[in-house]
Image (cartoon, rainbow, N blue to C red):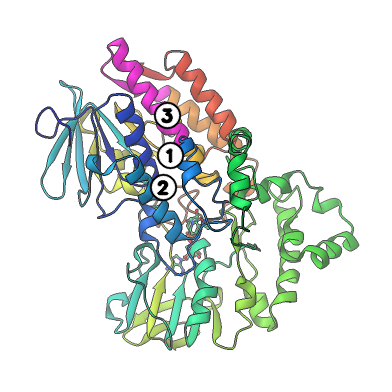
Amino acid sequence: MSADGPGHYDVLVIGAGFSGLYALHRLRGLGLRTLVLEKAGEVGGTWAVNRYPGARCDIESIEYSYSFSEEIQQEWVWTETMPAQPEIESYANFVADRLDLRGDIALHTEVIAMTFDEPSSQWRVRTRCGQTFVAPFVVAASGILSVPLEPDIAGMDTFAGTSLFTGRWPRDGVDLGGQRVAVIGTGSTGVQLIPVVARDAAELVVFQRSPAFTLPWRVRPFEPGELDGLKAGYAEIRAAQRAHPVGAARLSAFSVLLEMLARPPIKSATPQERSRAVEEHGVLGALNWGDVFFDIEANRMATELYGEAIARIVDDPDTAAALVPSHPFACKRPIIDQGYYETFNRDNVTLVDLRRGGIEAVTPTGIDTEQGAFEVDVIVYATGFDAMTGALSRIDIRGRDGVALRDVWADEGPVSYLGLQVAGFPNLFTVQGPGSPAAATNFIAALEHHVEWIGDCVSSLRAQGYRTIEALPSAQEEWIEHTTSLVAPTVLVHPTCNSWYNGGNVPGKKRMYMGYTAGLPEYRRRCEEIAAGGYTGFKLS
Ligand code: N01
């Protein structure tokens, strides 16, 4: 590791996931002595630990990949249209090797505290092993979905069988053959996991608190020569991505939603037109109306149709009814699946709709609910994440006057300026912080922009002799007003929606929509304008 004193660097990066890997490459390329601190024993971040069966990205591989290196995008070989977890993890390792990053990554190095020393304008960063690192700049590349949320169910630790958490699935896998398995949680993770577990396990009991809206999708291996053809046109593919609001111009979970916005309203459709939509296009046809995002009544009408579409797939009418969501469509992240509803026609699968009676406790032999007891050998918790702010809230981060970041976010909600900085925390950059487009876009496209903006900013400050940059409270306030005004007319903020987008999935977390929904091109334009204007909204000193 390159250092001019024990633990002294120009920039410290927290996390060696996709953001951290690119940050290291970019910052090093700018001549900055950079060290990445990673708590895990491997690179890849969220994609290295969410190893549950069925884990897969819902954006096409040729777009869910770094665009900054022509060599990397030409050399790496994707095998499927939408990549599965093992391939994404291998890709992260390939990039780390190809760019010779490992020498500047400290693995097994968990940051637990950091303090901004005002006289020296330096961050002092402490790790669990007791090391201290010092640098004027810190880039938090700690992930938006990197802190798994374990539910608070009585008796969880008394279970005598195997407890598994999708967010830290055993590296060597788990043989579920012949086992009675419970899955708790039916978000994106549960919806991917459930069809695969159903095929492997002797019995599967799905504990569902909120049914998902999910659209069927075909993932397939590339045909011979297909990937080469795509790679030959990579310049056009990347240009189209850059121009697209979600940073993915080909079909993805997000682009399906965007296309819906341009569709006619359900409210002016005739009953025949509505029925035909379901007959011809199933669950997608049920939801494919332009007014569902803005009009809660239209949303309810679409949900009713959605129920009809489910009933055409799921044989048992009770089970079909139990799979119909109660929250508005689109207030949670879109999900795409492979054979989710068909799974509930299997003899070895039981659905427990917790809206009819919740979980009371985990016992040594299984799960007790208000509807009865279920004996199982394995419990899988697919219960989500403390998203966006979770990773940094777990570090004791002290900015000006010793103020703790976790207290600011607890009191004011997940505030930030551009999702890049929080007022009162100079020289601390957040990659994909709250208020940035991350949550509703192709994360890789979004992170590339953030990393590049941060690198340019640090270089520019140093060239001009500035030591600190910090978001102004007034600019932060205006940004939050702007981001919240964008979603105010939509179902994204409906009170019945508890989602990681708004923090409603974490007990006690202050609710605030944490994304920027005007799209990546508009966001980029604003960030470039701010930089060109001498970093308007930031104080430089
Ligand atoms: O988490 P979630 P996730 N008792 O929060 C339930 C990304 N991702 O890991 O909704 C019973 O969506 C909870 O119920 P409720 C993607 O961005 C991407 O599935 O709170 N149930 C919900 O059903 C995604 O949005 C990919 O009522 C409990 C589930 O657990 C994000 O990760 C794949 C419970 C959590 O769903 C998060 O998805 C996977 C309890 N005590 C993930 N506590 C792809 O790229 C929670 N639940 C495709």
Question: Circle 3 — which element?
Answer: helix
Residue 541 visible in rendering: no
* Residue type at tag 2: Ile
Q: Position of residue 292 (x, y in %)?
A: 72, 51
* Residue type at tag 3: Glu
- The 10 Å Cα crowd at callout 3, few under 14, some 14 to 19, many 20 or more, is some
- Please give left or right for residue 471 compared with residue 82 in the image: left
- The 10 Å Cα crowd at callout 1, few under 14, some 14 to 19, many 20 or more, is many
Q: Is residue 181 magenta?
A: no
Q: Nearer the viewer, mark 2 or mark 3?
A: 3
Q: Earlier in the sequence, mark 2 or mark 1?
A: 2
Q: Earlier in the sequence, mark 2 or mark 3?
A: 2
Q: Contact, CB < 8 Å: mark 2 with mark 1?
A: yes
Span colored in magenta: 448-474
Task: Give the overall secondary structure of the magenta segment.
Answer: helix
Image position of 353 with respect to 371: above or below: above
Q: Give the residue at mark 2.
A: 144
Q: Position of residue 525 (x, y in %)?
A: 55, 24
Q: Please give the name of the residue rendered at 12% of the width and 27% of the height, measured from the top-left corner.
A: 4
- Please give left or right for residue 56 compared with residue 362 in the image: right
Image position of 326 with respect to 477: above or below: below
Q: Give the residue at mark 1.
A: 432
Image position of 329 with respect to 25: above or below: below
